Image (cartoon, grey):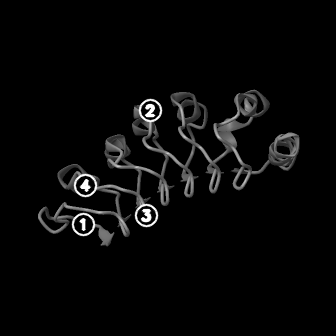
Amino acid sequence: MAQAAANVARRINETIEEGRDCLDLSDCDLISFPEGVFKMLRSCTDNIHKVSLANNQLKCLGNKFFHTFSQLQDLDVQGNVLTSLPDSVGDMEHLITINLSRNRLTVFPDSLSCVKSLQNINVEGNQITELPMEKLSLMSSLKSLDVRSNPLTTDTESVPHHFSILT
């Protein structure tokens, strides 16, 4: 546990010291987003455009995460145990890509349909049975939706859409 915490602290310090726009906390055995990260990064969160939390054991991401990283363009949370996203993800004004593959989602995160800048959504390998096709079809920026390896009952062709669906 101490080694994992030291690894997280080292990665955060590198991000700050090198002025990176990417925070990579993938493969860190995280079960929640560390509260200390918010404090350590408070002076530079506006400069962070990409966050990778892939391959951890995250059960949830709170509203504070999305409020803090308001300039986020790319979020990778694949390979966790997320069952939902908070409504605050819908307030993200710059988010272009979100990777939620290989989590435990049973319902498509409805709040994603409020993100006007979103171009790529990956929910491959979850347990989603239905897609809000009417809401998704109204997302003018959406280019790609990856829903492979989900037990979908939704007919993805039932509503006209302008984006690619990988099934």
Q: Which of marks 2 and 1 precedes in the sequence?
A: 2
Amino acid type, callout 2: Ser
Vertical relation: 67 (above or below) 159: above
According to the picture, the residue beneath numbered tag 2 turns out to be 88
The quadrant of the picture occupied by the N terminus is: top right
Of badges 1 and 3, the one in the foreground is 3
How far separated are the C-alphas under marks 2 and 4? 20 Å
How far separated are the C-alphas under marks 2 and 3? 24 Å
Specify few, some or many for label 2: CA neighbours under 10 Å numbering under 14, 14-19, or 20 or more: some
Tell whether label 4 touches label 1 (CB within 8 Å).
no
Badge number at residue 162:
1
Of badges 2 and 3, the one in the foreground is 3
Identify the residue at horizontal 38%, vertical 45% (top origin): 115
Tell whether label 3 touches label 4 (CB within 8 Å).
no
Of badges 4 and 3, the one in the foreground is 3
Amino acid type, callout 4: Leu
According to the picture, the residue beneath numbered tag 3 turns out to be 125
Of badges 2 and 4, the one in the foreground is 4
According to the picture, the residue beneath numbered tag 4 turns out to be 131
Q: Which of marks 3 and 1 precedes in the sequence?
A: 3
How far separated are the C-alphas under marks 1 and 3? 23 Å
In this figure, what is the number of numbered marks? 4
Q: Which of marks 4 and 2 precedes in the sequence?
A: 2
Q: Is residue 108 left or right of residue 48?
A: left
Query: Which structural element holds mark 1?
Result: loop
The quadrant of the picture occupied by the C terminus is: bottom left
Q: Percent position (x, y) of residue 35?
A: 70, 28
Q: Which of marks 4 and 1 precedes in the sequence?
A: 4
Q: Percent position (x, y) of residue 111?
A: 35, 40
Identify the residue at horizontal 35%, vertical 49% (top origin): 106
Q: Which of marks 3 and 4 precedes in the sequence?
A: 3
How far separated are the C-alphas under marks 1 and 2? 26 Å
